[in-house]
Image (cartoon, grey):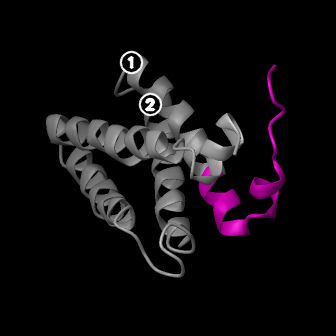
């Protein structure tokens, strides 16, 4: 028998968690669109700016989420710092015509800043893991 999802822990989480989750989920979906669409178009640039904003929002909001190690930053916060450094570097690269550097940085951000940490959030002891798989 399939157990119903319990949204209570997610709803009880603070605003930083909600902001972070919304930004990462939209960035994850938008990232797929960005990966498959043609690059260099006006739409790519517009959606790219939105993706940059979402990634920065996710990174900054993560500093108010300290539940992994009670009241302290955890090693996962290093990814937030990586995002805060790499996003501006990737924007700088494309602004200066360094397309391959931009491409590599954005791909690395997508996979190490969204996909990999997203998989870790699905561990049973984590908030989303408990939501998806039950407690």
Image coords of residue 44 (percent x, y): 44, 30
Asked if marks 1 and 2 touch (Cβ < 8 Å), the reply is yes
Image coords of residue 36 (percent x, y): 41, 17
In the foreground, 62 or 97: 62
The outermost residue toward the front is 1
In the foreground, 3 or 131: 3
The residue at the point 80 percent across, 37 percent down is 5
The residue at the point 34 percent across, 66 percent down is 75
The residue at the point 24 percent across, 57 percent down is 89
Using the image, determine if residue 40 lies above or below residue 71.
above
The outermost residue toward the bottom is 71
Which residue was labeled with disc 2? 44
Using the image, determine if residue 19 lies above or below residue 52.
below
In the foreground, 73 or 44: 73
Q: Secondary structure at mark 1?
A: loop
Image coords of residue 81 (percent x, y): 33, 66
Q: Which residues are magenta?
A: 1-21
For the residue carrying disc 1, how many other residues have a C-alpha within 10 Å: few (<14), some (14-19), or many (20+)?
A: few
For the residue carrying disc 2, how many other residues have a C-alpha within 10 Å: few (<14), some (14-19), or many (20+)?
A: some
In the foreground, 2 or 22: 2
**CA gap, disc 1 to disc 2?**
7 Å
Q: In the rendered view, does 69 fall on the left or right side of 20?
A: left
The residue at the point 24 percent across, 35 percent down is 103
Using the image, determine if residue 91 lies above or below residue 73.
above
Which residue was labeled with disc 1? 38
Q: Is residue 15 magenta?
A: yes
Count of residue discs: 2
Image coords of residue 70 (percent x, y): 53, 77
Q: Is residue 45 magenta?
A: no
Picture quadrant of residue 86: bottom left
Q: Secondary structure at mark 2?
A: helix
Q: Earlier in the sequence, mark 1 or mark 2?
A: 1
């Amino acid at each position: 028998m399939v157990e119903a999802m319990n949204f209570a822990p997610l709803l009880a989480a603070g605003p930083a968690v909600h902001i972070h989750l919304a930004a990462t989920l939209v960035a994850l979906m938008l990232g797929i669109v960005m990966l498959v669409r043609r690059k260099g178009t006006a739409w790519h640039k517009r959606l790219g700016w939105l993706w940059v904003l979402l990634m920065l929002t996710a990174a900054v909001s993560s500093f108010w989420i300290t539940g992994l190690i009670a009241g302290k930053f955890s090693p996962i916060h290093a990814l937030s710092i990586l995002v805060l450094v790499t996003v501006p570097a990737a924007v700088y690269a494309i602004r200066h015509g360094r397309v391959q550097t931009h491409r590599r940085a954005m791909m690395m951000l997508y996979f190490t800043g969204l996909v990999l940490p997203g998989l870790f959030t699905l561990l049973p002891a984590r908030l989303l893991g408990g939501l998806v798989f039950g407690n």
